[in-house]
């Protein structure tokens, strides 16, 4: 199979586009994990909810040319609003508590959102069709490649740049980075860290919602889809480095390419390989490929 | 001190009478509670006493389960040899993997245990010839003397009580106190000459061993092993049992296991939305009863030392 | 006979030279104070000595045997005890248990899975509590005690490993003048009884000059001066860097 | 163990005892335990199959039950998890005093329930599980019956269609777990027999739980085969199809799919995204066949569900329940041994035609509807249907 350069090129594109898709989804998790130090099990549920909200909105806008994109923005806003309510009502009372309690809180969200979806959208498999004009393929010279997946690559890079710019170049971004380093110090400077945590949680959830909406056309919406995606997000967060956006980008690419080329090389053991890689990264570089070791402790 | 001994004795006596109540449902229910109570007790050795949050405790439960299934059925060993051997295999695995896990701390430790737990699931899923893969290891050769619900109930009761007693002795031993010290202040523990990693490795191995016992019991109870028990949601379940019951007290996880299994069996009869019920209960515990049921009861009685 | 020899100790945190070429020797029974403004590297210096951080340069040896690179637990077992700037005790355990667990560790019983802990080393623990005047606080939960008493408890814990060299990181920090006096008297008395060598950091000039028989001054990670209290008081560089020129009224 | 906590445990145990007293089983009642998942990823099938079961039970009770015996259904949720299915099956027998068990969706659930039925000596009719392992000598026991088609029937039917379509170079795209392995066995063996010169030149095994199939799609397209045999079943097929379409997968390759992709509900969910021209199967189709029994069943189902185009999954629950009830009718008693003897060799009428329960391995000769996906002529149903379509009987395909 290696003699066929076109196939290799397409598999590479498959890997890259899957990687970008995974990055859009996992970037929200990394942002929340990095700043709030909360391991958000509910991230997969937000992703799923984003897909279902998109399904409803697409139905509501009944496929006007911009209908899909309005639905994507709508899903992001909806998830952001939900996150805002959850944070204000419940999550912020847990920040001073042990990490375990925040983690179990997100696990309770998984259970509740799962039933919310079942009640709201029923239990049958739902499908969002591609936005108009993007259900075909584009000629890349070497071969044709689905236009929607190419667009996902672009959006993924944009999200990456957007987040990178926000975190590194804006004042708010600097506060977010500071909050990540040392919460007490910031509070002593009179900065309302609570509000930073709120907006990081809202932003991370909104991105997850957007990720769900963008992924909806290419996957089937069904109960239980949140469980699979959350494990992949954790793998990406670990390989890339807990809380490092660059790490999430790199981790997503690695997972995407592994999925694409694993098929060619070792289809049998791909499922074992992923977890083995997770173990090895944790043993060799616990803070991940691009993460920074926290305290200079031994 | 003797107040709690008589309390325990009373409870054990009552448990022993359960099979005489004539309801097989109750026998199955209490047997399952015993097994998961032991599983939760083993988990709490790590969390409650050692302060270590493991996301992969289901790995030992399922290794113990598969090991006993394979030894009993595929290799046809006699039960009295296969059962302890399965536990030994689990202990070895826990020590080996624990050696790596205790090198890390905090969230990295949790993530590594999650990774190893999922690795165990992936191997069990793929190694179809040995573990039965996604269909599971069906039809375990259970010895004659264990092949009736009542007889197995008593066997399981004895094993669980024995293990619980050993755990009870360990947590109150010199080692137990040292383990608590490593949780309270790792730095200071290091500075009284304690090799903290070795203390944690012993706790990790002990917890894995007792989880392996619970897994082996579960195999005999179900006459089969399912790959789903190795998935991370089982590790989350045992964590919720401990938190619900109260990690601060020895008996907390037992109560948590009893309440969770009982709800698991009964709530689904009335509603298909049992996940929401569990979610609400979990939220209630997190916000209003952070020390769990046992902690809540203890505090109401003046809060003795655990 | 030199108890602790440190030569050319250096510590570089990816670019920042926290400690630079410190050499020092401590004789048995000596009470050596380390002076220096905040951020001079005192705590880093202690962390390097006790193995919490591995120094990037230099060798530390205790009673002639090299200890750099060993883990803190191995160093402690060699006979070095330590207390911390920020109190390090077991908050949810009782005062008695705090000391008892240190006794258990010292007697090498930490891994006894089946030996009931409750009555282990009861007398020795009570004696130690008496030594640091905490007898009546035996059943109190350590975390709830006053700051001063917690410092005393930490001292007791450090003493359990029967150290010959005791490192005290600002033992009287955050104490009222009266508490400072009492704790200094206690430390001096215990050091006397047990023939301990002391190495401690301290801000309170009065404490330094009453208890220390040798003083070293640390500044920006370098050992600026080392000698008897009188020599240090008379030393001009120390005066300018540390005492800021008002040394004469402090004497 | 403080006093208070022991008190709590005592009262928990007592309440459990009270709640556990098995319902007094009057003589006349036929108590059936329906084990269908109503939560978890496979609840799509569980909820729907349970409705079919309940419809038949209500109808039979309305007509005075079986020889005057009222039928009682006890439902417990297996949560798409074999460990839960085991516990639920045990509770149904021990607490609810059921005489029969039906249900189970995946092969692991089927095996788990079968194991409990064997231990407790209760008849279990498997409604959906297809794995041939269940009825293999190693796991078969006299209390086990299977109403569903097995993977031999499904794999061989697919091979027949591939032969009819005349493929010489064949690719497969089978999910990497037991359902995929057993289909691979039956399909490959039968294809070898009926079309010796056909070659399987490329096999892809998508990872269990994968959501991105593009790598498998493009590799299969690059293999240069005439067509693809796949078991990407109804629940996950929409994702696969939408990822494959832009690559022109369905234009370049013919496609034969096991896993009931032809189920009407799947067509409805996918709308125009459902690729035309693919060959696939279904348990039952509301629009075929046009026989009196089937039309009557479809009418009942329309009224019962209140939907004009009812799904195919209720038929699985309906037929499994029918086997139990006809077995009791033939035996004249709920006693397990009597019903087993009555069921062996019994032939019953079902909405999809006559079914016979083989005495040797307690499997019904359940065939499947196979057909080609094409646009529907009926304006009121603007989704794709199987046309042409035929019922492929199982008689000589089951082994």
Image: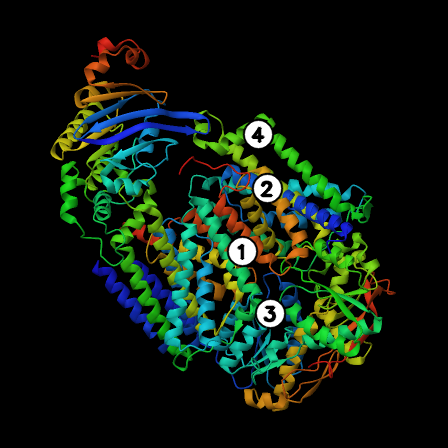
Q: Is residue B89 visible?
A: yes
Residue found at x 46% / y 52%: B113
Q: Is residue A293 left or right of residue C127?
A: right
Front residue (pair D363, B283): D363
Task: Report x, y in % for residue B23.
Answer: 42, 77
Nearest to the eye among marks 3 and 4: give it.
Answer: 4
Q: Determine which residue is flagged by label 3.
A: D36
Around disc 1, counting alpha carbons within 10 Å, would you say few (fewer than 14), some (14 to 19), or many (20 or more)?
A: many
Front residue (pair D81, D179): D179
Do marks 1 and 2 both belong to one polypeptide chain?
no
Secondary element under disc 3, as helix, strand or loop, is loop
Residue found at x 19% / y 40%: C162
Nearest to the eye among marks 1 and 2: give it.
Answer: 2
Q: CA distance from mark 3 to mark 4?
A: 50 Å
Q: How many marks?
A: 4
Q: CA distance from mark 4 to mark 2?
A: 17 Å
Q: Determine which residue is flagged by label 1.
A: B276
As displayed, is residue D36 above or below residue A120? below
Question: Is the C-beta separation of discs 4 and 2 under 8 Å?
Answer: no
Task: Report x, y in % for residue D271.
Answer: 79, 57
The quarter of the picture where the N terminus of chain D appears is bottom left
Q: Earlier in the sequence, mark 4 or mark 2?
A: 4
Q: CA distance from mark 1 to mark 4?
A: 36 Å
Q: Determine which residue is flagged by label 2.
A: A248
Q: Is residue C78 left or right of residue B47?
A: left
Question: Is the C-beta separation of discs 1 and 4 under 8 Å?
Answer: no
Q: Is residue C91 visible?
A: no
Q: Answer with the quarter of the image where residue D8 lies.
A: bottom left
Pinpoint the chain carrying mark 1: B
Q: Determine which residue is flagged by label 4.
A: A173
């Amino acid at each position: 199979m290696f003699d066929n350069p076109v196939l290799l090129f397409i598999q590479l594109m498959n890997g890259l586009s899957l990687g970008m898709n995974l990055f859009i989804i996992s970037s929200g998790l990394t942002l929340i994990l990095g700043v709030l130090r909360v391991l958000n099990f509910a991230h997969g549920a937000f992703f799923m909810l984003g897909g279902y909200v998109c399904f409803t909105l697409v139905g509501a806008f009944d496929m006007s040319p911009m209908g899909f994109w309005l639905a994507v923005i709508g899903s992001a806003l909806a998830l952001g609003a939900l996150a805002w309510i959850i944070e204000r009502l419940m999550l912020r009372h847990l920040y001073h508590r042990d990490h375990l309690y925040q983690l179990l809180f997100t696990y309770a969200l998984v259970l509740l959102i799962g039933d919310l979806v079942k009640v709201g959208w029923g239990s049958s498999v739902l499908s969002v069709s591609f936005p108009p004009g993007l259900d075909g393929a584009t000629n890349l010279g070497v071969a044709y490649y689905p236009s929607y997946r190419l667009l996902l690559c672009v959006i993924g890079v944009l999200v990456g740049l957007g987040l990178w710019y926000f975190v590194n170049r804006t004042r708010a971004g600097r506060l977010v980075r500071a909050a990540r380093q040392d919460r007490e110090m910031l509070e002593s400077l009179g900065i309302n860290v609570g509000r930073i945590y709120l907006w990081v949680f809202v932003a991370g959830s909104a991105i997850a919602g957007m990720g769900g909406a963008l992924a909806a056309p290419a996957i089937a919406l069904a109960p239980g889809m949140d469980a699979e995606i959350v494990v992949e997000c954790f793998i990406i967060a670990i390989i890339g480095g807990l809380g490092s956006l660059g790490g999430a980008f790199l981790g997503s690419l690695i997972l995407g390419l592994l999925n694409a080329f694993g098929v060619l090389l070792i289809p049998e053991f791909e499922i074992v390989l992923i977890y083995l890689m997770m173990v090895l990264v944790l043993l060799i570089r616990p803070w991940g490929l691009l993460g920074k070791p926290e305290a200079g402790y031994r | 001190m003797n107040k709690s001994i008589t309390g325990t004795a009373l409870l054990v006596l009552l448990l022993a009478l359960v099979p005489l109540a004539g309801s097989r449902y109750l026998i199955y229910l209490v047997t399952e509670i015993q097994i998961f109570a032991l599983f939760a007790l083993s988990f709490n050795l790590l969390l409650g006493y050692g302060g270590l949050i493991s996301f992969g405790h289901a790995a030992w439960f399922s290794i113990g389960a598969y090991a006993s299934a394979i030894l009993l059925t595929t290799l046809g060993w006699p039960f009295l040899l296969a059962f302890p051997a399965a536990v030994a295999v689990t202990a070895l695995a826990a020590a080996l993997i624990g050696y790596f896990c205790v090198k890390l701390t905090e969230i990295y430790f949790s993530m590594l245990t999650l990774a190893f737990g999922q690795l165990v699931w992936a191997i069990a899923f793929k190694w179809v010839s040995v573990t039965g893969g996604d269909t599971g290891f069906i039809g375990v050769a259970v010895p004659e003397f264990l092949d009736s619900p009542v007889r197995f109930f008593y066997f399981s009761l004895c094993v669980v009580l024995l293990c619980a007693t050993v755990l009870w002795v360990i947590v109150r031993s010199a080692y137990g106190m040292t383990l608590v010290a490593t949780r309270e202040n790792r730095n200071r523990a290091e500075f009284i000459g304690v090799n903290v990693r070795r203390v944690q490795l012993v706790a990790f191995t002990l917890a894995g061993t007792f989880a392996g016992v619970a897994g082996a019991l579960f195999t005999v109870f179900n006459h089969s092993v399912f790959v789903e028990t190795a998935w991370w949601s089982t590790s989350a379940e045992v964590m919720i049992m401990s938190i619900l019951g109260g990690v601060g007290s020895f008996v907390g996880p037992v109560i948590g296991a009893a309440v969770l299994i009982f709800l698991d069996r009964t709530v689904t009869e009335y509603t298909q939305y049992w996940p929401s019920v569990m979610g609400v209960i979990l939220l209630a515990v997190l916000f209003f009863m952070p020390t769990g049921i046992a902690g809540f009861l203890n505090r109401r009685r003046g809060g003795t030392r655990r | 006979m030199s108890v602790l020899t440190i030569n050319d100790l250096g510590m570089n945190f990816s670019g920042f030279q926290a400690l630079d070429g410190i050499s020092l020797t401590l004789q048995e029974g000596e009470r050596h104070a380390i002076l220096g403004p905040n951020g001079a590297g005192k705590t880093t210096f202690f962390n390097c000595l006790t193995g919490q951080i591995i120094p990037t340069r230099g060798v530390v040896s205790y009673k002639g045997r090299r200890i750099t690179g060993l883990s803190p637990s191995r160093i402690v077992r060699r006979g070095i005890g330590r207390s911390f700037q920020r109190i390090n005790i077991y908050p949810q355990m009782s005062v008695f248990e705090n000391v008892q667990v240190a006794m258990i560790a010292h007697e090498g019983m930490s891994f006894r899975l089946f030996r009931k802990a409750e009555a282990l080393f009861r007398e020795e623990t009570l004696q130690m509590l008496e030594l640091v005047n905490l007898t009546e606080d035996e059943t109190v939960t350590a975390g709830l005690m006053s700051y001063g008493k917690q410092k005393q408890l930490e001292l007791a814990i450090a003493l359990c490993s029967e150290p010959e060299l005791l490192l005290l990181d600002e033992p009287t920090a955050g104490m009222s003048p009266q508490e400072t006096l009492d704790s200094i008297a206690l430390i001096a008395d215990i050091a006397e009884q047990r023939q301990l060598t002391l190495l401690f950091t301290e801000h309170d000039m009065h404490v330094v000059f009453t208890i220390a028989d040798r003083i070293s001054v640390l500044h920006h990670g370098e050992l600026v001066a080392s000698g008897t209290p009188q020599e240090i008081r008379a030393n001009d560089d120390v005066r300018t860097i540390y005492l800021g020129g008002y040394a004469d009224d402090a004497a | 163990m403080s006093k208070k906590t022991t008190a709590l445990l005592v009262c928990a145990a007592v309440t459990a005892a009270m709640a556990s007293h098995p319902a007094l089983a009057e003589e006349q009642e036929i108590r059936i335990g329906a084990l269908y998942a109503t939560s978890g990823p496979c609840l799509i099938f569980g909820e729907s199959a349970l409705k079919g079961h309940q419809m038949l039970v209500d109808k039979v009770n309305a007509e005075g039950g079986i020889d005057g015996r009222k039928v009682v259904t006890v439902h417990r949720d297996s949560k798409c998890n074999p460990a839960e299915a085991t516990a639920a099956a045990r509770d149904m027998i021990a607490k609810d005093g059921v005489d029969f068990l039906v249900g189970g969706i995946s092969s692991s659930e089927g095996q788990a329930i079968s194991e409990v039925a064997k231990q407790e000596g209760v008849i279990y009719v498997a409604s959906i599980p297809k794995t041939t392992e269940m009825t293999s000598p190693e796991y078969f026991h006299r209390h086990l019956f299977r109403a569903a088609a097995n993977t031999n029937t499904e794999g061989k039917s697919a091979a027949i269609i591939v032969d009819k379509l005349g493929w010489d170079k064949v690719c497969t795209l089978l999910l990497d777990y037991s359902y995929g392995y057993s289909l691979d066995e039956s399909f490959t063996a039968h294809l070898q027999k009926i079309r010796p010169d056909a070659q399987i030149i490329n096999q892809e095994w998508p990872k269990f739980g994968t959501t991105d199939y593009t790598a498998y799609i493009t590799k299969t397209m690059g293999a240069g085969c005439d067509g693809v045999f796949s078991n990407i079943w109804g629940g996950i097929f929409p994702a696969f199809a939408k990822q494959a379409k832009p690559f022109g997968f369905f234009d370049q390759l013919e496609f034969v799919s096991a896993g009931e992709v032809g189920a009407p509900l799947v067509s409805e969910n996918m709308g125009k995204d459902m690729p035309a021209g693919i060959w696939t199967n279904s348990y039952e189709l509301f629009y075929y066949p046009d026989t009196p029994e089937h039309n009557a069943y479809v009418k009942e189902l329309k009224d019962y569900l209140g939907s004009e185009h009812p799904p195919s999954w209720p038929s699985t629950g309906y037929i499994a329940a029918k086997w139990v009830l006809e077995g009791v009718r033939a035996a004249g008693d709920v006693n397990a041994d009597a019903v087993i003897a009555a069921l062996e060799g019994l032939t019953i009428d079902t909405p999809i035609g006559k079914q016979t329960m083989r005495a040797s391995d307690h499997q019904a000769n359940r065939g499947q509807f196979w057909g080609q996906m094409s646009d529907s002529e009926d304006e009121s149903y603007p989704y794709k249907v199987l046309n042409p379509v035929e019922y492929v009987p199982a008689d000589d395909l089951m082994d």
